[in-house]
Image (cartoon, rainbow, N blue to C red):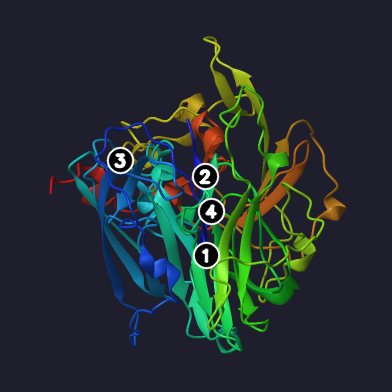
Amino acid sequence: MRTINSFLLILLLGVFVSSMPVTEKRGDSCYNNEIFSPLVLPEKTNSPTTRKYTFKLSQTTWAPDGYSSAVSLVNSQYPGPILQAYKGDTFSITVENDLPVETSFHWHGMFQRGTSWFDGVPAVSECTIAPGSSLTYEFSTEGQVGTYWWHSHYMAQYIDGLLGPMIIHDSEDPNLKDYDYDYVPIPDSGLISGKGQYSDKNSELATYKVQKGKKYRFRVVNTGAYAFYTFSIDGHKMKVIEVEGTYVEPFEVTTLPLHIAQRYSVIVEADQDEKDYWIRATMSSECLPSDNLTINHDSKINYNVTAILSYEGSSSGGSPDSQAYTDDVTPCRNLDSKLIKPLTANPPKDATQSISYTVSFGASPEGVVEALMNNSTYVPDYNNPTTQKIMTENMEVKDLSSSQNAVGLNDDKGVAEIVVWNGTGTTYDKSSLNTDNPPIRDTTVVPSWGWSVIRFNIDNPGVWVFHCHIEWHIQIGMLAQLVELPDQLKSQKLPDSIAGHSKIF
């Protein structure tokens, strides 16, 4: 089995694995070419509006890195369509499933206030979308701005290609005057925005055209399943302005570490000689076990994934001679949190409810490897999602099966604290916590034999998944459910499209 970790620039650092019967398709006809040009913004309206999109799912065989494999596509493209809206708009996205298998779609980072059933996690917020049927997801972007991504949340399906970027524009973005153009440039092989090289070094690379003297916003997203990347552009510094939907005090870096699902917006000034430069998304081999028990063993992984930043007037012919930065970046770790200072923040100082999770691995009685949270592996109930159990069956959280790994959060004026132990531990140094201006983000790295503390206000009724975003870990059970304000959730009305079966289109 082989996987492709891709960048989306937006940089999609994503993945492919498939064994389903498909039709043959070669060449570059599957590339989503809008990803290689500056963003064309949607029309701005005087008041919030509904942005409608349709996803038509299909399968084919394709070789974006020179190695032919089965892929799933949205609207015959990879990466999938760039979803765009302005702050306060509503997304209406109809998914038409023409695959021979079930699916569902998750909108990573969306708060889904009042629409938790459209979060797109099967067995938790909805049933799957059956082959030949459709479902329309509708949710507001109120209170959110910045860079997000969408992907299938059924099994490990998104690594076949069902993923893409999601951008919420802000007319009051304090950084608008600081750049001229907005680029959205996406383990055996790595891709940048759908292009890369596995063993075929003649495969096409993603190229981003720039003009000397102009400034560019690059939205960088790791949409992978396993690989940790360090991202850089030879000869160019990057000014970080946004971290996962939150504006931050701008700061400069030359190398940007990203683990799966992490996102940054950076401004790059085209102020160097007019030639070609390597864009680098280097896989950290230290974070990718490659012994003979893993899928990486004896593979031809290209750890040095590249694209090209090409100045207008360059005569390099797509063969940069630029040199990489030699920064000492600690592999498998977040960007230094002391650098990330939100422009506005009112973080909770104290927790009213604390939940502690120890994550580990074990084996079932049959000898199958399992991921454990507090010694319990999550088992999805695809036939009866937790949201429906709570809303339509009036079930209490305490009555859910132990395999659901569910915890209730009931204090509507409270603050939840989640402590994650990656290994062993029971206490941490509370004096080390930053409660004044901590990073605000939805994805973090818990170092090996380390811990992380996460706090948030209990104010969003719904059933939410708390899980590892290393895809192989979630598939073997590293997931918990947070049932937030269940009594308020029960008072909401579940849409007919979720409560019933999707219609055949």
Q: Earlier in the sequence, mark 1 or mark 3?
A: 1
Q: CA distance from mark 2 to mark 1?
A: 19 Å
Residue 138 lies in quadrant: bottom left
Q: Nearer the viewer, residue 46 or 361?
A: 361
Disc 1 to disc 4: CB gap under 8 Å: no
Q: Which residue is mark 2?
A: 198
Q: Residue at x 24, y 40 (%)?
A: 23
Q: Nearer the viewer, residue 485 or 503?
A: 503
Q: Earlier in the sequence, mark 2 or mark 4?
A: 4
Image side of residue 179 versus residue 65, left or right: right
Q: Nearer the viewer, mark 2 or mark 4?
A: 2
Q: Which mark is residue 13?
A: 4
Image side of residue 121 versus residue 176, left or right: left
Disc 2 to disc 1: CB gap under 8 Å: no
Q: CA distance from mark 1 to mark 4?
A: 8 Å
Disc 2 to disc 4: CB gap under 8 Å: no
Q: Which residue is mark 1?
A: 9
Q: Earlier in the sequence, mark 3 or mark 2?
A: 2
